[in-house]
Each structure stands twice: as structure tokens, then as C-alpha cells.
Image (tube, helix red, strand yellow):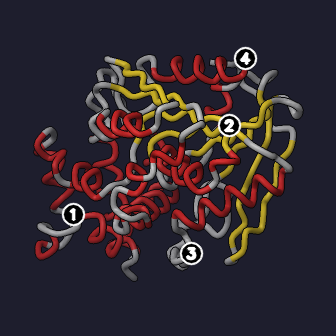
Amino acid sequence: MYPPIEPYASGHLDVGDGQRVYWETCGNPDGRPALVVHGGPGSGAGAGWRHLFDPDAYRIVLFDQRGCGRSTPSAADPATDLSTNTTGHLVADMEALRAHLGVERWLLCGASWGSALSLAYAQAHPGRVTALVLFSVVANTRREIEWVTRDMGRVFPQEWARFRDGVPEAERDGDLAAAYARLLDDPDPAVRDRAARDWCAWEDVHVSLAGGHTPSPRYADPVFRYGFARLVTHHFANLGFLADGQLLRDAGRLAGIPGVLVQGRLDVSGPPDIAWRLTQDWPDARLEIVETGGHGGGHGIGERVVAALDAFAAA
């Protein structure tokens, strides 16, 4: 990992729909442009992402996706309308940011939900992407969402039962993400807070198969956990606003774009089969499995990501 650095420029870009997207740039203003695409949806682009890039080689761009982080309005405000927070809107925001910053083409680095959003952008705008470095890869298919919200109960039965029981009994055999999304929009703030706590407690469980996992401190913040849970369930309940299997089906559109996919063998939140399936129709992509890795950047995954970014910088 590279040492901490601070942005040399930042701002808010008006992208329409009343949305102002926060962005920042750091590293070398004349370096190779790279865009960080954070996960969640709703995690925000924290400073830790800057450590992945050689600051002498890259012009590093970070942004907070609609509704989260320093972008406004915030999904943590229950009055904020989420109808214009879709994958299509987020892809358009990325393209607007590229034009605003005067970037011709850039590398995308994304994780988890950010990997799916990176794929959606690259498939829509392949001529604007020089390379993709993705880890904890997901494609937001119906099967993946059912896996996370229901099938993982076979691995963590007690914790999943608590998660399931957080929704009304009549909804427990249905779409749990949609049920939680409704609870998070309930007029009663106590109902909203309980739903956010229950959703985030399950988030902390289903990524924790790798050894040494500790709960995420960010969920202790009631503002963060509510906005995060609201955005995740909004997208999950709508399959990421993509046709089911779209990102896998359209992987051939990435031909000519080099990619490195880094995946933990113990990532039960985003199992390795999705990354593997992508490489079957994306000949320029390479899959690297980290045997002890889970979901996220630990257990050697971050080091593989840094190595891939260093290699693209040298090229």
C-alpha cells in the first residue's frame, strides 16, 4: 500500500435531478487517469482507496455516488427521493465527471457493487476505458441477491434467522431486500432505525468467512447505516436496475480492454464463479484467486490489486 495522500482538487458536480456529486483528485495531475468506483451501494469513497495507487504514476479520481458520502441530497434523509438513483443514472454521472475533468480515457478500479457499476460503465462506454482492476466481483444477478439474502442462511443459520425475522411474518418467504426497503421508508423513525440495524448486522455477517473478521465500525453511525441500508435495498430490490444477467451476457463488449479480477476463495458474499464466468467471454481479463481471501481487501487481496495497478502504470 502507498502512503497517505491528500486531494489537490475537489468539488461538487451538478449532474441534474437536483443531485450534486462530490469528487476529488489526488496524485499526479499529469499521471494516468484512474477512477475509483466504491462499493455498497452507499459506502462512499473513503481515503483508504488512495493507498492503492502510485501517486507519482496516477491521477486518481474519487467520487461519492449519488445519495451517499459527501454527495447531496443524502439517502440518509428519509425525505430524499431515490427514483433517480439507478445504475443508468450512476453511469451517466461517471461519464459527466469524465467530461468535467477533461479526461479522455481512464482506468476503473472497483470493488463489490463498484465492480458491477464499473462493468456497466465499461460496457456502455468501452472507448473511454483503458483497463479494469476489479475485486470482490459481483454482477447483481437475481441469483446473487437471493444467495446473499436467503441462501447464506445455510452458512449462518442463527444470524440469518434474526435477519429474516426483522421483516413482517407475511413477507419472510418473499423478497427480503424489497421488504427491508419498505421498512426503511416507513414513516415511523423507530421502524426505520430497527430495519437499518438489522440489515447492517446481516451485512457484517455474510462477509465474514475469512479468519480474523471484525465488525465494521461504520455501522455504529446511525446516519451512515440508514443511508447505506436504504441504498443497498433500493438497488437489490430492483436487481441493480439491470436486466437479469446483463453484465455477464454483455461481457463480450469488453473485448480489447485489459482487466484483472481479484477474488477471495472464501468470499461467500460474492463467490468466485461470477468473476470466472466473466473471463470466459472477456478474453483480455485475468482472474487471480486469493486462497485465504474473503470479501474486501484483506488477506492479500489489496496487495494483488496494488500489483495490478502498478503493472498498468508501468505499461
- Residue 281, image quadrant: top left
Q: Secondary structure at mark 3?
A: loop
Q: Earlier in the sequence, mark 2 or mark 3?
A: 3
Q: Are the two marked residues, 2 and 1, in contact with CB atoms closer than 8 angstroms? A: no
Q: Position of residue 314 (x, y in %)?
A: 72, 17
Image depth: mark 4 or mark 1 in front? 4
- Residue 229, image quadrant: bottom left
In the rendered image, which residue does mark 1 sit on?
166
Say which residue appears at 30% left-offset and 25% top-offset. 265
Could you tell me how far apart the alpha carbons at marks 1 and 3 are, in whole angstroms? 27 Å
Q: Position of residue 254 (x, y in %)?
A: 54, 43
Q: Are the two marked residues, 4 and 3, in contact with CB atoms closer than 8 angstroms? A: no
Image depth: mark 2 or mark 3 in front? 2
- Amino acid carrying mark 1 in the image: Gly
Label number found at residue 289: none
In the rendered image, which residue does mark 4 sit on?
314
**Up-down: is 156 above or below 169?**
above
Label number found at residue 84: 3
Using residue 268 as the reference point, say whether residue 158 is left or right of it.
left
